[in-house]
Image: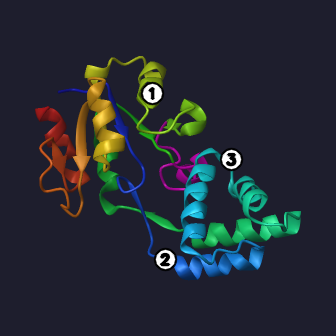
Amino acid sequence: MKPELIIFDFWNTLAFAEDYEPRKFFSQLGIFGINIKRETDAEKFSHAFSKLMCFAKNWEDFSRQLLKDFSDNQRKKNMIRLADFLRENIAYKLYDDVKEILKLPGKKTILTDSAKFLVESSELKNFGEIFTPVETGFLKPDPKVFLTVLKSFQVNPDKAVMIGDDPERDIAPAEKLGIKTILIDRKNKLADYRGTKTTSLTELRKIIEGL
């Protein structure tokens, strides 16, 4: 197959979060008036944290929303301090094999539920167009997310390939639309997966040619 478009997920496909201790992280947030002591509080905060980040414009905007929902201290000075803290403590790295995707033929794009400013702050800022919930208006696995990308590039589903690590959010919805898919399972945890799979981006060219 010679795809006209290759779509990449971001988290755990191209990048990974560095290890951190949730309890320590939550306790540090108390400095900014965000108090998370119970398990139910942690679950609520984690869900809101992810959702707010999807649509945030930058760290300051993200911090402003967090303080609005979880703290009585919404002063600008506190917001700036929280933004600096999050910027320093929410760290991630690109996988070493990401450089291999630059050699792949055809147009390439990133489709993620993460904040655009996170992707743009990486070495992939010049990779190409980046689609986040801000651009699509929806979250995976909603098929409208994938259709928005296809429409933007004017590519038919059978001429596109979706590459991601989540069978339910990246792979299944794309397959239902007729998009070819490749699951990346770096630690081979999904041994029973019956679709096209790889453990490294270095194998993509050969796999795509055989689709």
The numbered mark, 2 or 3, whose residue comes first in the sequence reads 2
Q: In this view, does 190 lie above or below 40?
A: above
Q: Quadrant of residue 44?
A: bottom right
- Given contact means CB atoms under 8 Å apart, are the residues at marks 2 and 3 in contact? no
* Residue 179 visible, this angle: no
Residue 204 is a magenta residue: no
Instruction: Name the residue that disc number 1 marks.
Output: 149
Query: Which residue is pictured at 78% across the width and 66% down the height?
Result: 71
Query: Which residue is pictured at 37% across the width and 19% down the height?
Result: 155
Per the rendered image, the range of residues in magenta is 114-128
Three-letter code for the amino acid on which mark 3 is drawn: Lys
Report helix, strand or loop for mark 2.
loop
Q: Distance between the residues labelled 2 and 3?
A: 24 Å
Three-letter code for the amino acid on which mark 2 is drawn: Tyr
Instruction: Name the residue that disc number 2 marks.
Output: 20
Closer to the eye: label 2 or 3: 2
Report helix, strand or loop for mark 1.
helix
Q: In this view, does 31 lie above or below 116?
A: below
Instruction: Name the residue that disc number 3 marks.
Output: 57
| Quadrant of the snapshot with the N terminus | top left
Considering depth in this image, is 18 or 75 the residue closer to the camera? 75
